Amino acid sequence: MLALIASKQGFRPPYLQSIYLPQAKQLQFGHNINWMEEQDIYSIIGEAGFEDLVAHFYRHVPADDILGPLYRGRDLAGAEKRLREFLIYRFGGPARYIEERGHPRLRMRHAPFAIDHPARDRWLRLIASALEETNMPAEAKEILWTYFESTATAMINQAG
Ligand code: HEM
């Protein structure tokens, strides 16, 4: 996090340098400057990396006082599979999620759940500890975290 704030101010810690594209590529890809690197994640951490990450995350969901109630009565194993398959597709792996579920439309699919700021924060806290528990390169964690932070914010659909 500190690293991300620092990079916005022009300073780039050495371990982050490799995840930024040269300026020409940044122009070519517009705002999504990490796109090429995002697409490399699957080949770096593989199926097992995503499986591990999502399993750690869902292990803590049922007992969580904010997230638990959102998932109560739902097919938790199915939800775990959908998140895993989505991330595999999103980060350069096989597009099985799209084959099974169609266009992600994440905001629309989250509309039935009341997601406020505290729920977003809790989701991020659980995924952050899942990232900590998994064994993957620091650059992969940074890229995934950047994505999770902005996407979880986009899922907020309630004041609070
Ligand atoms: C980076 C942020 C997030 C990502 C990438 C993500 C991804 C997903 C995906 C792929 C699904 C399955 C959609 C489907 O195919 O049906 C899903 C379902 C769900 N998400 Fe999220 N989500 C995010 C944030 C959140 C947040 C912040 C909350 C609530 C605090 C949340 C709660 C749920 C719930 C309750 C479901 C339904 C589970 C089910 O029964 O399928 N998600 N999410």
Image (tube, rainbow, N blue to C red):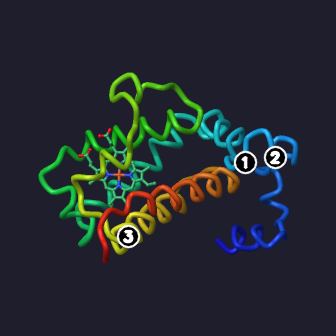
**Horizontal side, residue 115 vs residue 112: left or right:** right
Q: CA distance from mark 3 to mark 1?
A: 27 Å
Question: Viewer-proximal residue, 118 or 43?
Answer: 118
Could you tell me the amino acid type at mark 3? Arg
- Provide residue 125's location: percent of width, then percent of height: 44, 69
**Mark 1 and 2 residues: CB-CB less than 8 Å, in contact?**
yes
Relative to 72, 25 lies left or right = right
Disc sitting over residue 21 in the figure? 2
Going by the numbered disc 2, the residue's amino acid type is: Leu
Task: Name which residue type carries label 1.
Answer: Ile
User: For numbered disc 1, what is the local secondary structure?
Assistant: loop
Q: In the figure, residue 98 lies in which quadrant?
A: top left
Q: Earlier in the sequence, mark 1 or mark 2?
A: 2
Tag in front: 2 or 3: 2
Q: Which residue is mark 1?
A: 33
Q: Upstream in the sequence, badge 3 or badge 1?
A: 1
Q: Position of residue 136 (x, y in %)?
A: 62, 50
Q: Quadrant of residue 91?
A: top right
Foreground pick, 127 / 155? 155
Direction top: furthest residue:
99
Q: Nearer the viewer, mark 3 or mark 1?
A: 1
Residue at 52% of width from left, 62% of height from top?
Answer: 149
The disc label shown at residue 52, or none: none
Residue highlighted by disc 3 = 122
Q: Secondary structure at mark 2?
A: loop
